[in-house]
Amino acid sequence: MNNEQLKQLKAMVEEAGDLPEAAKVRLLEILGQQEAEVESSQPEGASEVQGKLLSSVEEFEAAHPEATSFMGRLATTLANMGI
């Protein structure tokens, strides 16, 4: 779950009128813990690293179109087999 999803879930719990107060408090505590874990696991600049990785993959695909095509067909075949 990413941080945005956690915020949406937290808002839904806060707005829920049919939940007992003790359950709301406990759910909000759990969501707070999850938010802290998500924030600590994603260092600042993670989007930069992700961008560099995507760029490297695109360069590989351009440099090796036959290998990329083969891997795509292989993945499709395995998916069709249920693997």
Image (cartoon, rainbow, N blue to C red):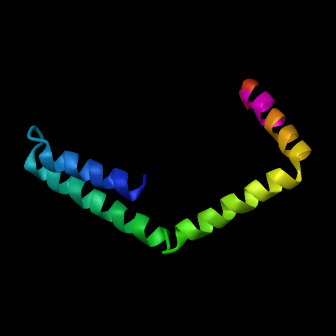
In percent of the image, x 89 and y 45: which residue is there? 67
In percent of the image, x 42 and y 55: which residue is there? 2
Across and down, in percent, residue 1 comes to 43, 52
Q: Residue furthest front?
A: 62
In percent of the image, x 68 and y 63: which residue is there? 53
Left or right: 33, with 42 as reference point: left
Across and down, in percent, residue 69 comes to 85, 39
Left or right: 42, with 51 as reference point: left
Across and down, in percent, residue 28 comes to 22, 56
In the rendered view of the protein, which quadrant contains the C terminus? top right
Q: Is residue 67 above or below residue 25?
A: above
Q: Is residue 82 above or below residue 46?
A: above
- The span shown in magenta is 74-79
Out of 59 and 39, give the one closest to the viewer.
59
Left or right: 47, with 4 as reference point: right
In percent of the image, x 13 and y 42: which residue is there? 16
Left or right: 11, with 3 as reference point: left
Whether residue 76 is in magenta: the answer is yes
Majority secondary structure of magenta residues? helix
Across and down, in percent, residue 8 comes to 28, 49
Out of 5 and 13, give the one closest to the viewer.
5
Out of 58 and 83, give the one closest to the viewer.
58
